[in-house]
């Protein structure tokens, strides 16, 4: 029979990069295990990852692991970002060696990952932090002993000049400078302030907001492309029913960020406990009462969600439905209505104006604009938001397929650099006699049916 083991893992670094340590506090029934280690020259992210790897490898394979980390970099990396990294063959990923090692150590195991706020008085996390610093202290002692032993040997050689030690060409200085430039980029670019994470640091709206404690069930993906301009958020919600007036509640919110008609890669996704049965709506979204039992109440996540959404243009299909529910939920949580701080665009109204008398559901628009199909056996807020982004771009001017990475940025930089344009003649394919005859036949049928000349007549 498998049993459950709880792990608290943490990393520490004195200077980033600098002397670092990792620690794992492992609780299995009545037994406790404490392991730690460190490195002379490392980063905080690498120590956080190492703590998770060492903790997992310490535990038997058949045990269920419940892991707590105060690093959103580790938690979101192993549960969300890693899938995209694998598809790109780890291109442009910091610390790929440790991420691959962590991924390998997780294979074949049952693991639950949880984020916990660091330095907040939680006993397990405080013990892991203590172990991480102990690992750094032990590493420092070993380094001093090694240095002391080496100095004895060096004293004997002082009279022997060594041009490599003097480094007349400045080679060592060049290496040091390069390393000093490399590691801080890692922290700024990929680490989410593990000591006191702010939920969406890439967004100006979130930067201006007061720091809010991140709830472990809030999933905010940071932007992968830096763009400037007004924010648009393509949004969708799932609810327990159709009528907010009758007490129906939101159970899922998903939104993805777009700036200048390009996705930034940033998104927010949250499940909430409605404190009432989902009823027949489960047939639409597939979200069960059991799944929502441990999810936060809307009030618990309202501040983070409000900070992420406010000031942006909200784009939604049948936006009145989503905004009525969001306004109701935010008011219950003590905020102003979201519609008071956001511009709202309804793609359903837009589609009805553009295609009067036709079906304008999201599925119908996907077919009409020939957008690649996704599996929509059940509706999901983030999935529907992604689909709607394609539909919105198609309805408002074209661009449907695009790379969420830096492709668009590269194109803009290429245009600004004045690169030479390549011009080529495209072949002209003329219609055959049979095709011309079919065209004439169709034009006559159109004129007979509508009583007006066809636009395509000669």
Image (cartoon, rainbow, N blue to C red):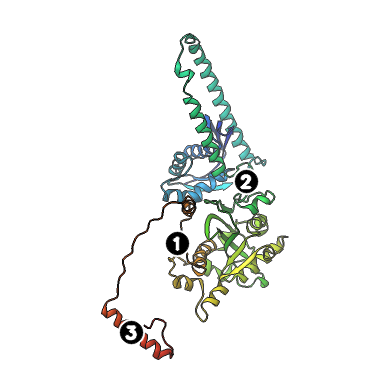
Residue at 46% in and 64% down: 400
Mark 1 crowdedness (10 Å alpha carbons): few <14, some 14-19, many ≥20: few
Q: Earlier in the sequence, mark 1 or mark 3?
A: 1
Question: What residue sits 30% from the left and 70% below the top?
Answer: 429
Disc 3 element: helix
Q: Which residue is under mark 2? A: 197
Q: Position of residue 258 (x, y in %)?
A: 55, 59
Give yes or no for contact between labels 1 and 3 (Cβ–Cβ under 8 Å).
no
Residue beneath disc 3: 440
Identify which residue is drawn at 42% across, 49% down: 88
Tell me where residue 388 appears, x and y as whole percent. Answer: 52, 66
Residue 211 x %, y % = 68, 48
Lower sequence index among marks 2 and 1: 2
Q: CA distance from mark 1 to mark 3?
A: 35 Å
Residue that mark 1 sits on: 401
Within 10 angstroms of label 3, few (less than 14), some, or many (20 or more) residues? Answer: some
């Amino acid at each position: 029979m498998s049993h459950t083991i709880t792990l608290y893992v943490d990393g520490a670094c004195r200077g980033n990069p600098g002397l670092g340590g990792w620690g794992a506090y492992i609780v299995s029934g009545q037994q406790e295990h404490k392991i730690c280690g460190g490195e002379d020259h490392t980063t905080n992210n690498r120590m956080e990852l190492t703590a998770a790897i060492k903790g997992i490898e310490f535990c038997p394979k058949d045990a269920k692991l419940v892991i707590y980390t105060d690093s959103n970099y580790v938690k979101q990396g192993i549960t969300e970002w890693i899938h995209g990294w694998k598809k790109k063959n780890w291109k442009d990923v910091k610390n790929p060696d440790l991420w691959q090692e962590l991924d390998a150590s997780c294979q074949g195991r049952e693991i639950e990952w949880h984020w916990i706020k660091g330095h907040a008085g939680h006993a397990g996390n405080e013990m892991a932090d203590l172990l991480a610093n102990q690992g750094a202290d032990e590493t420092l002692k070993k380094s001093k002993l090694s240095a002391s032993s080496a100095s004895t040997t060096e004293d004997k050689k002082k009279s022997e000049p060594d041009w490599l030690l003097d480094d007349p060409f400045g080679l060592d200085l060049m290496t040091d400078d390069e390393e000093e430039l490399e590691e801080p980029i890692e922290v700024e670019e990929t680490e989410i302030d593990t000591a006191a994470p702010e939920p969406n640091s890439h967004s100006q709206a979130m930067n201006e907001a007061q720091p809010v404690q991140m709830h472990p069930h809030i999933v905010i993906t940071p932007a992968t492309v830096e763009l400037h301009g007004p924010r648009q958020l393509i949004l969708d919600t799932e609810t327990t029913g159709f009528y907010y007036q009758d007490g129906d509640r939101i159970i899922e919110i998903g939104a993805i960020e777009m700036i200048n008609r390009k996705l930034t890669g940033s998104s927010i996704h949250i499940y909430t406990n409605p404190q009432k049965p989902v009823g027949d709506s489960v047939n639409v979204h597939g979200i069960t009462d059991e799944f929502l039992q441990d999810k936060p109440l809307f009030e618990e996540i309202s501040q983070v969600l409000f900070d992420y959404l406010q000031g942006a243009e909200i784009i939604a299909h049948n936006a009145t439905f989503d905004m009525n529910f969001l306004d109701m939920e935010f008011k219950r949580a003590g905020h102003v209505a979201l519609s008071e701080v956001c511009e709202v665009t309804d793609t359903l109204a837009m589609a009805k104006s553009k295609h009067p008398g036709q079906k304008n559901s999201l599925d119908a628009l996907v077919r009409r604009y020939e957008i690649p199909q996704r599996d929509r056996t059940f509706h999901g807020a983030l999935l529907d938001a992604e689909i709607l982004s394609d539909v919105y771009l198609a309805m408002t001017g074209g661009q449907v397929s695009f790379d969420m990475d830096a492709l668009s940025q590269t194109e803009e930089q290429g245009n600004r650099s004045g690169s030479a344009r390549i011009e080529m003649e495209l072949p002209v394919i003329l219609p055959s006699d049979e095709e011309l005859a079919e065209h004439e036949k169709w034009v006559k049928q159109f004129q007979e049916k509508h009583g007006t000349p066809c636009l395509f007549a000669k």
